[in-house]
Amino acid sequence: QVQLVESGGGSVQSGGSLRLSCAASGYSYSRNCIGWFRQAPGKEREGVAALYTGGGITYYADPVKGRFTISQDNTKNTVYTVYLQMNSLKPEDTAMYYCAADCQVVGLHPGAYNYWGQGTQVTVSS
């Protein structure tokens, strides 16, 4: 059974940085995809960054390009971890951030992913 546990959220001022972590267990990361999504109050969930583990290919939403970086750590046998380094944060980045894994189509569409974590809150103040 796939379990995704996010951590690293918090409150920062505009221009600050945070690094989110997603620990995935029971997940076959070989030739698969994992991504970060966010949902602000009153808005639809949107893709932020995704990683195709088969070739290390990354995808980023336009609003975060150049500021966010997705990376992975597959050196531990039982837990696979994906990170989202977020720099130059803006108030519009405020949202609940979710990790998702195992997609039918590689990319940033939330509907393509089968497993979801519970989310971690990111709040950026001006």
Image: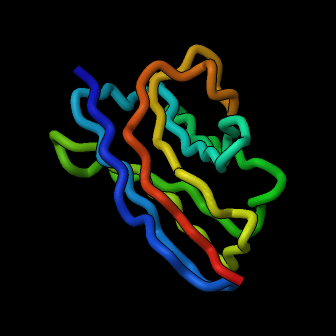
Please, which colouring scheme is shown? Answer: rainbow
The total number of labels drawn is 0
Residue at the left extreme of this rendering: 78
What quarter of the picture does the N terminus occupy?
top left
Q: Which of 69 and 46 is in front in this view?
A: 46
Query: Residue 48, image x and y in percent?
Result: 67, 48
| Residue in view at x 46 percent, y 23 percent | 102
Can residue 24 be spotted in the picture? yes
Residue at 49% x, 36% y is: 34
On screen, 35 above or below 40? above
Name the residue located 39 percent from the left edge and 28 percent from the top edge: 30
Instruction: Out of 75 and 22, give the one closest to the viewer.
Output: 22
- Name the quarter where the C terminus is drawn: bottom right
Relative to 125, say whether 122 is above or below. Answer: above
Residue 56 seen anywhere in this rendered image of the structure = no
- Image coordinates of residue 105 in percent, x first then y, are 64, 18
Left/right of residue 58 with respect to residue 11 in the rendered view: right
Q: Would you say 122 lies left or right of 117 here?
A: right
User: Which quarter of the picture shows residue 17?
Assistant: bottom right
Q: Where is residue 21 in the image (x, y as percent from the top left)?
A: 38, 57
Question: Which residue is situated farthest in the right direction here?
Answer: 62
Q: In this view, does 101 lie to the left or right of 95?
A: left
Tell me where residue 121 appears, x and y as whole percent: 48, 58
Q: Depth check: 123 or 58 in front? A: 123
Considering every residue shown, the one lying at the far top of the view is 104
Measured along the vertical axis of the image, is residue 122 above or below residue 81? below
